[in-house]
Amino acid sequence: MYLCVMANILDRDIQYLAGIGPKRAELLRKELDIHSFRDLLYTFPFRYLDRTRIYAIREIEATMAWVQIRGTVVGISYAGENRGKRLVATLSDRTGRIDLIFFQGIRYIEQKISIGKEFIVFGRPSSFNGSLNFVHPELEDPETALSQGQTMTGVYSSTEKLRNNGIGIKVFSKLIHNLLQQCLDQIPESLPEHIRQRCGLISIRQALRNIHFPENLQALEQARARLKFEELFYLQLSLLKQKNVRMRHGSAPVFGRIGEYFNDCYCRLPFELTNAQKRVIKQIRTDMRSGLQMNRLLQGDVGSGKTMVAFLCAAIAADNGFQTCLMAPTEVLAQQHYQGALQFAGNSGLKVALLTGSTKTKERRRILEELADGQIHLLVGTHAVIEDPVQFQRLGFAIIDEQHRFGVEQRARLRYKAELPPHILVMTATPIPRTLAMTLYGDLDVSVLDELPPGRKPITTRHLSEKHRSALYRFLKEEIKKGRQVFIVYPMIKESEKMDYQNLQNGYEEIVQEFPAPEYITAVVHGQQKNEDKAHDMQLFADGKAHILVATSVIEVGVNVPNASVMVIESAERFGLSQLHQLRGRVGRGAEQSYCLLMTGYKLSQESRQRINLMCSTNDGFELAEADLRMRGPGDIEGTQQSGLAMDLRISNLSKDGPLLNYARELAQDILQQDPLLERPENKLLTHQLTYLRTHCEEPIDYSRIS
Ligand code: ADP
Ligand code: MG
């Protein structure tokens, strides 16, 4: 396989490029992580200076990127004083007037301009005091400007260090120019002809030239389309092929029967399953019967009943003589799942155990024994359950709750806990936009619980600030009087941990003063507590013995206290959308009207305000997730960083290129359907390219290890 990978000129070390020696190569490596010709070639401009067109002043809008206008100076004036002094030159064409503003190098500008002189002005429009202007634009003599040719110039991201060492924008651009000259005609085509034709894509050579030096907007768009498609297509092809391979090598536990455990537990459920739950259980059953390993992602908003689905499937595993483990990201959650599992199992005989970091030695020994001889059907725990000493007699099913908290490596270890690979169900309450799910979990099947159990009232969300605080406290007292419980959450951001704890501590003291014992009992949970203290206070609240729980975002995931009806989030502007939504999901689980109250400072950035407004306007987690992706980009979405699955797409953007992603995935699917192993002559290039990408390019996601 590897032998067929041709030596590719793009793999050459960057220092062998004309204009780059060892010293510059070192700099490029350090500053921009550019090692090879390929790395440099695939460093694309992040924007373009479009000099192909001269705009009329009337057409200018504040939202435009860099534009060119041509006009005559009709006025020069000064504003401000001393350090705030600025020169304002007014430019006019036949369509209108616009101000050019200079704060620095005023002397130089004074020499350059005079009334009546004509310029080509190149800059980025902005709006100030309600009128449009250009701040420090480039000024050029029309004759010279036009003689340079009308092109689009790429702008590359650079660093201070690079600029100081002589690799500024122009030099960088020159290096890429050299590179293209040296190797463009040796770059092998990387998409088969039939695909290029089918999708109307230009060649790789054209694309690479035009992405760096487009002649016009249309050429740039064609280059973008080709490169984006290629990136997304190979990503999807690799994911789907992986899945194909897994399916072919399938031999997984077969859960063919429904037996006593399932029937018993099912009959005792105090409620009817939602249609969504029934549908998902059917999907899972089909997988589990197939003889192929299940790898399924179960998405559903908080409270949609994912855990219940998982328990029922664990009962099916038991009915077929297999064991199940359920892994939760925190001790508190593991504890809660354990309680839930005990209640679920009742006296059906389904045996449940809890194993966490704080399980006592004696108890641990007993659990390990009972696991090894198959007495325990369902083991609930933290990552302790996949540690080495834990040996199952016959593990057949693994449930991972809130998957993004789990390292990829930890998930991989599951494989080696059993003879046959266990079926895997990953549950996440962080709704993930479809495009992101398709990429992060592209080789998993996805089930969605898109229906909440009946009888839940939508949560009312309000934005409050400091001036509402006494009203807030009055409101909390009323709710507590009605028998409800209250969460008060403080942000905990790593960089300012000390200050955050201070805030929490102060907040806690204020609450205790405002809500004095014994009338009010306040529990507190945060990361600097001993585990026992944490568990103690958490339990106090879960049992309804404390009215208020002051906490950091540790309660973020999963904790279920149906009687809690108010979630107060302090400094809400510091939380991301999906985190806010997660927190809000802690309430609204009972039949009562629930509230989420977002406390913020007065001064909010535009983005924070947008987030808060969105939270107040919708309860739909998927809608929020889409908005989060739009606002922050995939790299910042909750979970993608922690999971080590940072997106490393060079040119496509998951929030904007959804349709293209769909198209690429469908095409990949189509090709694999006709040629599952990509063996046909016309698909040889695909196989070659997949191997090449896997071995020669940095692989951002090691898909083979996810499942
Ligand atoms: P998730 O894991 O999706 O957050 P859970 O499975 O923990 O949701 O369910 C949340 C709560 O709703 C639990 O108290 C559970 O017992 C209850 N529940 C689950 N399914 C239903 C249903 N179909 N009808 C009513 N209540 C349900
Ligand atoms: Mg849950």
Image: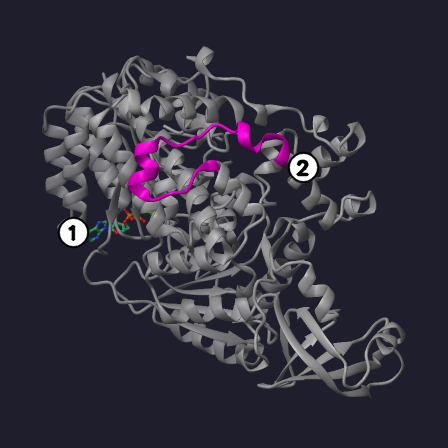
The structure's colour scheme is one colour
- The answer to whether the residues at label 2 and label 1 have Cβ atoms under 8 Å apart is no
Q: Position of residue 67 (x, y in %)?
A: 60, 68
Q: Is residue 448 above or below residue 683?
A: below
Could you tell me which secondary element the residue under label 1 belongs to? loop
Q: Quadrant of the C terminus?
A: top left
* Residue at the (84%, 74%) spot, across then down: 112
Of 502 and 161, the residue lying toward us? 161
Q: Residues within 10 Å of mark 2 (few under 14, many from 20)?
A: some
Q: Which three-letter amino acid code belongs to the residue tagged 2? A: Asn
Q: Position of residue 160 (x, y in %)?
A: 77, 49
Residue 201 lies in the magenta-colored region: yes
**Circle on res. 178:** 2
Q: Residues within 10 Å of mark 1 (few under 14, many from 20)?
A: some
* Residue at the (36%, 26%) spot, across then down: 686
Q: Earlier in the sequence, mark 2 or mark 1?
A: 2
| Number of marks | 2
Instruction: List the residue tagged with mark 1.
Output: 274
Q: Which residues are magenta?
A: 181-204
Q: Is residue 385 above or below residue 370?
A: below
**Circle on res. 231:** none
Residue 296: quadrant of the picture: top left
Q: Is residue 319 above or below residue 300?
A: above
Of 454 and 332, the residue lying toward us? 454
Mark 1: is the Cβ under 8 angstroms from ligand 1? yes
In this picture, residue 87 sits left or right of residue 290: right
Residue 642 is at least partly visible in this image: no
Residue 345 is at least partly visible in this image: yes
